Amino acid sequence: MSAVIEIDGLRKTFRSLRRGERVALDGFDMVVEAGQVHGFLGPNGSGKTTTLRTLLGLVRPDGGRMSVLGRPAPHRLAEVVDRFGAIVESPQFFGNFTGRRTLRLLAVAGGLPPDRVEEVLVRVGLRDRGDDRVKGYSLGMKQRLAVASALLKRPELLILDEPANGLDPAGIREMRDLMRQLSAAGVTVLVSSHILAEIQQICDHVTIISRGRRVAAGPVGEVLAGFDRGEHRVRVADQDRAAEIIRAAGLPVESHPDHLVVADLADPAWLSQALGERGLWVRELTPLTPDLESVFLQLTGSETPRQVDDAGGSAEPAAEGDAA
């Protein structure tokens, strides 16, 4: 596969009289390959949206190299702008326009066929509300309209910043299904989200950013495997005695009110046999595999978000939201 997004050593420092100098991106790297559904994760203030805004030419970097669909960004983005769609933050629409009229105007401006409007309204679940004014839309509906606007030009690459923001559980499931459908159709999706369980379900690759630097990247399974300590949850009648036996064998063990957690257990059968030989019968022996949330917290949990928000938070003003 070829890379559709490449970021190498990206740096950005915001300066203001009130807040002084704050580093938002400190040599950040990321690669998104064609065909991936790539999750982009980080705590608030870690630099996610600054990265996306910089990639799209909305924020000027201090250093580093970027490319989108093989073109250096941002100065040659115009050559590929018809091949990608992007939603960063919360795009703003004219409240008195209907959703359908909004998309029709965008289609005309982009030289796109009018029937594409109906296709994207159906795709994002707004067909029955297309003639309602946007000012009456909920936050979740506005998010869907934003995604619809990015899909108008049948993009090869779709960049979504918090697309599930404001959606109810049914809407989140629909957004998940939409991303899967797009991926199956060959669209590369880069999605930034704080809903880690969703990212784990829909993404095949992930990049995690903390304090403006990449702290993990790769296939989701490989990133999780790197934090697998071979832990198992053990339930047995006499926990204290069982813990003594396990510690005597040199294995780390943690005691909880109704179970033990044993780490570095390469052979679960050994534990069952060792306790059984001493009259302690195991009632539960369950492997505890790491999930994306636990890994995320281990990598970023000690981070105290700085007062540099992802939208900029600097002397360089930023629009409230942007769609490309």
Image (tube, rainbow, N blue to C red):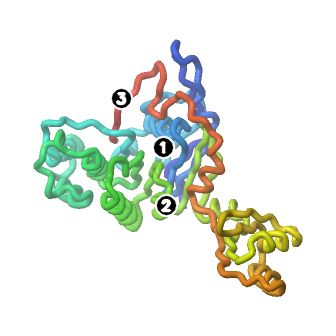
Amino acid type at image mark 2: Cys
Q: Mark 2 falls on what kind of element?
A: loop
Q: Residues within 10 Å of mark 2 (few under 14, many from 20)?
A: many
Asked if disc 2 and disc 1 are in contact, CB closer than 8 Å, the reply is no
Q: Earlier in the sequence, mark 1 or mark 3?
A: 1
Query: What is the x, y in percent for residue 251?
Result: 83, 68
Q: Position of residue 181 (x, y in %)?
A: 36, 65
> Which disc is residue 71 wearing?
1
* Camera-nearest residue between 48 and 298: 298
Q: Residue at x 17, y 46 (%)?
A: 99
Say the numbered circle drawn on residue 120: none
Figure quadrant of residue 77 = top left
Q: Is residue 149 above or below residue 185?
A: above
Of the numbered discs 3 and 2, the one sitting upstream in the chain is: 2
At label 1, counting other C-alpha atoms closer than 10 Å, the crowd grade (few under 14, some 14-19, many 20 or more) is some
Q: Which residue is labeled 3 in the image?
A: 319
Question: How far separated are the C-alphas under marks 3 and 2?
Answer: 29 Å
**SS at badge 1:** strand
